[in-house]
Amino acid sequence: MKISNRGAIPPFIVMDVMKAAAEREAMGAGVLHMEVGQPSTPAPGGVIAAAKRALDGDLLGYTLATGILPLRQRIVRHYLEYYGVTLSPERICVTTGSSAAFLLTFLAAFDPGDKVAILRPGYPCYRNILGALDIEAVEVPVGPDSRFQPTLAALDAAGGGDLDGLLIASPANPTGSMLREGELRAILNYCRARNIRYISDEIYHQITYGGATSTAVAHDENAVVINSFSKYYSMTGWRLGWMVLPEEMLRPVERLAQNLFISAPSLAQHAAVAAFDCSGELDANVARYARNRDLLLAELPKAGLDRFAPADGAFYIYADVAKFTDDAVAFCAKMLAQTGVAATPGNDFDPVNGASHVRFSFAGSEDDMAEACRRLRDWLGKET
């Protein structure tokens, strides 16, 4: 029987690492988890309480495809309070995680054969989802010389006026790098002049270390903004995200969402209304990430890992391991087997140069991060 080529996309390697780590744990061996971009903290207390109320109130039927109005209204209020941006609830679409938001955006904005620029290194699912939809992912290589964010010259080199879309995450995964506000404005002007649809991945907003984040929708109403409750709000398994859409995409996205998903999980939607009132608890999580970041930046060089991306935001250290290996997949497998430290090979994020990089997530507990640094220092000392 025929099988579609759409499934012949590369795996999401971090999921394979998670599987190997789970198998090790099932055998009774401990694992220090630095492989997955997931907070080690539970959902905020207010969210859990709201979920219990929703369960008791039997509020778990289908919702509108774009989400319940109270949640969309609360998201609008968040944009006003946090960014000073006024939106209407009609421009908000609540989605089954940011993953569904990317799929809906790609389907609504682009046709097969269109060209969408993404950064390399970058989140691999961008490239893989675009490929499954027969949309060409045009990779824009970025590195230390531009703080792992694109320059206008790099966009020109990638095709410039021939592009149909540009997707940038700030803060970025795996690097943690961020666009400065002036850089964001320049790129938005560049896209506007060339009729390029700009997609802003803002799922790591509010997890930053000294620099402020600016939302693309503050500068361009034609931009698509994608955010999530997974990272800052510590709600990965609740599978809930949202989009801020330009007017012309509202009905196309709604029609697609109706047919593909019906609606995002209703329990998560009712609970998430409370998430925006839990900033004290959530900011305490970010303060812990900051301490973990400082620890890794101080201790990893003692293990011989002293070349990193900026790590201005998110909760990742993207480290150059070229002095130890040119095969990050094998390196990470050996590291897990010999030290119990799980991390993600850079191949996931950069199919060209990623084999000499490893991404370490520092979203775990401070004790785990300190122990991981100790084990890596001992292990890599033996490797040199």
Image: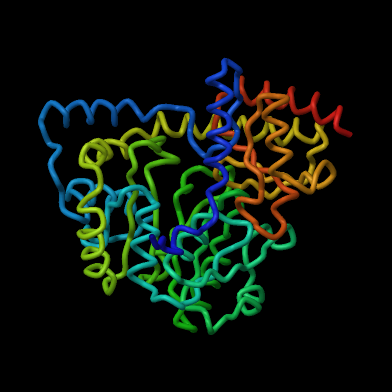
The residue furthest top is 28
The residue furthest front is 1
Image quadrant holding the C terminus, namely: top right
In this figure, what is the number of numbered marks?
0
Task: Estimate the x, y position of residue 50 in percent, counting from the top left.
Answer: 22, 30
Does 54 sit above or below residue 261?
above
Left or right placement of residue 234 versus residue 162 in this view: left
Task: Estimate the x, y position of residue 178 in percent, counting from the top left.
Answer: 58, 55
Residue shown at 21%/61% (left/top)? 90
Q: Nearer the viewer, residue 49 or 40?
A: 40
Task: Estimate the x, y position of residue 12 in percent, counting from the top left.
Answer: 53, 48
Left or right placement of residue 95 versus residue 198 in this view: left
Q: Nearer the viewer, residue 234 or 2?
A: 2
Q: Nearer the viewer, residue 254 or 84?
A: 254
The residue furthest left is 57
Left or right placement of residue 183 versus residue 126 in this view: right
Image quadrant holding the N terminus, namely: bottom left
Task: Estimate the x, y position of residue 208 in percent, counting from the top left.
Answer: 54, 44
Residue shown at 86%/27% (left/top)? 382
Which corner quadrant of the image does residue 267 belong to? Answer: top left
Left or right placement of residue 304 versus residue 330 in this view: right
Which corner quadrant of the image does residue 238 belong to? Answer: top left
Residue shown at 75%/34% (left/top)? 300
**Is the image coloured rainbow, by chain, by secondary structure, or in one colour?**
rainbow
Does 73 sit above or below residue 376?
below
